[in-house]
Image: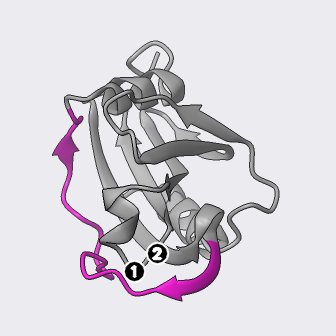
Amino acid sequence: MNTSIHLWSAAIGLCLMCTSVSAEWQRLPDEKAKDQEHYVDLQSVKQTGPMSIYRQIQVLSQGASLKSQSFASTVSLHEYDCMNAKWRVLQTVGFTQPWGNGDKVLLSSSSSQAKEWQALPETPLGQQTLDLLCPSGKDD
């Protein structure tokens, strides 16, 4: 991993817990996700060449997702490879209240190790996020 990306990852990871402070949240509309909303923190986006790192918040609303979970929102740190259209989740933290407020909740899928690179999800969220972070679709 590039040293500058590793440092940015560490710095943004520290800010992962300060969710609503100094954030510029951009909603990523997805008609299929009726009981949750996804937002990207545009102020957290850091880019080096074809790599982008950013924070995303998922807010659950009334519905099956909220009732079956012990959390009302999650804040996660993602890394995008714009050149190869791949992404991975570096860290995810659950919260008992919307917008990353309330108590932190340990998520069973959380890991101290970064997850493996994945192809972009074949949902509107995958393409919208790529378009937002990598306007040309690739690093120019």
Q: In this view, does 92 lie to the left or right of 53?
A: left
Please name the predominant secondary structure of the magenta segment in the image: loop
Marks 1 and 2: in contact by CB < 8 Å?
Answer: yes
At label 1, counting other C-alpha atoms closer than 10 Å, the crowd grade (few under 14, some 14-19, many 20 or more) is some
Q: What segment is highlighted magenta in the picture?
A: 101-121
Q: Which of marks 2 and 1 is in front?
A: 1
Image coords of residue 131 (percent x, y) = 45, 21
Name the residue that disc number 2 marks: 94
Element carrying mark 2: strand
Residue at x-position 82% and y-position 56%: 22
Image coords of residue 74 (percent x, y) = 48, 65
Q: Is residue 51 left or right of residue 115?
A: right
Residue 26 vs residue 14, the one in the foreground: 26
Q: Is residue 102 left or right of residue 4?
A: right
Where is residue 42, by image quadrant? Answer: top right
99 relative to 101, above or below: above
Whichever of callouts 2 and 1 sits on the residue coming sooner in the sequence is 1
- In the rendered structure, find residue 70 and report the number of the disc placed on it: 1
Question: How many angstroms separate mark 2 from mark 1 (CA)?
Answer: 8 Å
75 relative to 48, above or below: below
Residue 52 vs residue 55, the one in the foreground: 55
10 relative to 117, above or below: below
116 relative to 130, above or below: below
Element carrying mark 1: loop
Residue at x-position 60% and y-position 64%: 98
